[in-house]
Amino acid sequence: MRCVRLGKELPGLPAPPFPNELGRRIYESISQEAWNQWVRHSPMVINEKGLKLSNPGDREALLRECEAFLFGGASQPPPGWVPPPGSVRITKK
C-alpha cells in the first residue's frame, strides 16, 4: 500500500485501529510504520494537553490529533523529548 503520511509503498495495518470512519481511513491509507510513529507520539499529546481519556471530549480531541498527525502533517516531538516519569505510555499487546 502507498502510505499517505510517508509517501512510499509500505506494509499496512492488519486491521482498522478504531471502529469508525477514521479507523477505516487509517487502515486504507496509513502504513504500519506511520501508525507506530503515532503510537510513540500520542503519549506526548496526552501529557502536554492534559487529556483524560476517561473524558469523552478528551478522547475526541485525541482522535483529532491522531488524524492531524497522520493526514495533516502535524509536528513531530521536539528533538530529545523524553516522556516525564509517570506519564501515560501506550504499549502493544
Image (cartoon, rainbow, N blue to C red):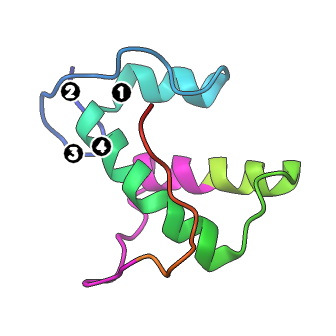
The Cα atoms of the two marked residues, 2 and 1, are separated by 7 Å
Q: Give the range drawn in magenta.
A: 65-82
Label 1 secondary element? helix
Q: Of 61 and 51, which appears nearest the observer?
A: 51
The Cα atoms of the two marked residues, 2 and 4, are separated by 11 Å
The Cα atoms of the two marked residues, 1 and 3, are separated by 10 Å
Horizontal and vertical percent position of residue 73: 38, 59
Circle on res. 29: 1
Label 4 secondary element? helix
Residue in the picture at 87% in, 54% down:
55
- Marked residue nearer the N-terminal end (1 or 3): 3
| Disc 3: which residue | 6
For the residues labelled 2 and 1, say whether their Cβ atoms are less than 8 Å apart.
Answer: yes
For the residues labelled 4 and 3, say whether their Cβ atoms are less than 8 Å apart.
Answer: yes
Amino acid type of the residue that numbered disc 4 sits on in the rendered structure: Ala
Residue in the picture at 58% in, 57% down:
65
The Cα atoms of the two marked residues, 2 and 3, are separated by 8 Å
For the residues labelled 2 and 4, say whether their Cβ atoms are less than 8 Å apart.
Answer: no
| Disc 4: which residue | 34
Dominant secondary-structure state across the stretch colored magenta: loop
> Does the segment drawn in magenta span residue 13?
no
Q: Is residue 46 above or below residue 50?
A: above
